[in-house]
């Protein structure tokens, strides 16, 4: 029991952030993250140990978020992303608190929501959970080389969105750069 | 590495590029402003992610352990308590305002006009008691005991309502009206709601 509580403490932040960036609601993220750990607890017996427990946990997190997004899409609760449509119950998006956030961070959270789920998850596994390419590959059942290219592509997509919204200098995300480098992707 | 390679720049940022390739890439970036800018942008994105990281609420770990069934119930989330306090404050304010605005004998206004006070007191959950008057009969107007005009106007409206109630006895509407006028006591709501109760 103490071991599992320690396991929760160790990974709560990463799991919570993955859920938060996937569902964009603090309440939903809280519930989803708990669901991930409850699934982990209940599935301990079936955990074969082929991968690290953390890898297995993040796979549960990604799958749980994907299920949640599918359910929301079915119930037509997913709406076209617009910063005015963020739930007002989410205190992190209240005006006074938003002003305290750095502009790029807010823009980044909005841009993340525009990414396809797979790109978002691969970025979050790298940036929030700090997984290596090999570990991300295990979580998402991808080859390391594929992780490398998809991660680069996700970053480029994110940069493009931020450039369009004026949060990254237009010069820095020049199309010539994309053309030059894009051939390699 | 003499040409631009986005994957390599991304991998360099992640520390996943072999040392020899990293050295070549650094050399290339010395000469290529576009790749330099791209590397800076990717670095800025990484910093943004760091800023974006959010600590889950303090109740997360105890709440999770509790839901698994291994720990004690954690304190309820502050937001729920704050919401309940807000609702309670609103209800109290509405009650106080309604008490201040009502005239001293306003309690009689809740009884349909035309029904004597002693009859209004026998209001039951099944509705008003039937008065032996033919439908369409003119209701008894209340005595004008020197009240101001606006109160008297209110009385006229109440008279009409009371007349309808008397005439409608026997159908469901009068019963609904009676229930609206004085709701029957309802059972205490369960808390927390079943949908949010923690799993054992």
Image (cartoon, coloured by chain):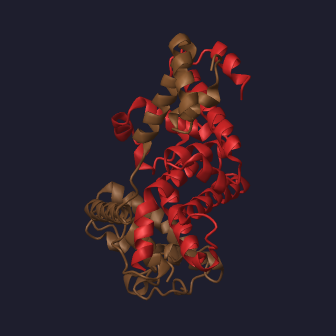
Chain colours: A red, B brown
Residue at x-position 62% and y-position 56%:
A62
In-front residue for pair B54/B122: B54
Instruction: Tell me the quarter of the image containing the N terminus of chain B.
Output: top right
Q: Position of residue B33 (x, y in %)?
A: 53, 12
Q: Quadrant of residue B91?
A: bottom left
Residue at x-position 58% and y-position 60%:
A55
Q: Position of residue A9 (x, y in %)?
A: 40, 64
In-front residue for pair B57/B79: B57
In-front residue for pair B6/A90: B6
Residue at x-position 66% and y-position 33%:
A153
What residue occupies the far front of the structure in this picture?
Answer: B20
Q: Is residue A171 visible?
A: no
Q: Is residue A151 above or below residue B92?
A: above
Q: Is residue A124 above or below residue B94?
A: above
Q: Is residue B136 above or below residue B130?
A: above
Q: Position of residue B98 (x, y in %)?
A: 32, 62
């Amino acid at each position: 029991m103490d071991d599992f509580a320690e396991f929760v403490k160790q990974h709560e932040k990463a799991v919570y952030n993955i859920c938060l960036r996937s569902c964009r609601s603090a309440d939903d993220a809280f519930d989803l993250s708990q669901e991930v750990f409850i699934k982990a607890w209940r599935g301990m017996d079936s955990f074969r140990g082929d991968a690290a427990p953390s890898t297995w946990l993040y796979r549960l997190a990604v799958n749980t978020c994907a299920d949640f997004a599918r359910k929301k899409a079915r119930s037509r609760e997913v709406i076209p992303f617009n910063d005015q449509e963020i739930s007002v119950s989410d205190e992190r998006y209240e005006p006074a608190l938003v002003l305290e956030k750095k502009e790029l961070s807010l823009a980044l959270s909005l841009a993340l929501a525009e990414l396809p789920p797979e790109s978002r998850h691969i970025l979050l596994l790298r940036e929030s959970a700090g997984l290596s390419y090999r570990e991300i590959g295990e979580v998402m059942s991808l080859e390391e080389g594929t992780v490398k290219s998809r991660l680069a592509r996700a970053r480029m997509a994110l940069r493009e969105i931020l450039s369009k919204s004026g949060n990254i200098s237009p010069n820095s995300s020049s199309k010539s750069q994309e053309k030059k480098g894009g051939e390699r992707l | 590495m003499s040409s631009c390679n986005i994957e390599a720049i991304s991998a360099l940022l992640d520390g996943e590029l072999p040392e020899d390739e990293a050295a070549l890439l650094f050399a290339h970036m010395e000469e290529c402003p576009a790749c330099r800018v791209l590397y800076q942008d990717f670095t800025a994105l990484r910093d943004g992610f760091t800023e974006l990281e959010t600590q889950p609420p303090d109740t997360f770990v105890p709440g999770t352990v509790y839901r698994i069934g291994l720990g004690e119930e954690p304190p309820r989330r502050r937001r729920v308590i704050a919401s309940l306090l807000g609702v309670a404050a609103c209800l109290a304010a509405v009650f106080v305002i309604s008490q201040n605005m009502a005239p001293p004998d306003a309690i009689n206004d809740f009884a349909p006009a035309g029904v004597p006070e002693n009859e209004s007191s026998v209001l039951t959950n099944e509705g008003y008691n039937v008065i032996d008057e033919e439908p369409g009969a003119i209701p008894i107007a209340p005595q004008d005991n020197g009240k101001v005009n606006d109160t008297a106007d209110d009385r006229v409206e109440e008279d009409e309502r009371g007349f309808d109630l008397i005439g409608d006895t026997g159908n469901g509407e009068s019963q609904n009206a009676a229930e609206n006028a004085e709701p029957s006591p309802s059972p205490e709501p369960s808390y927390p709601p079943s949908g949010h109760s923690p799993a054992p």
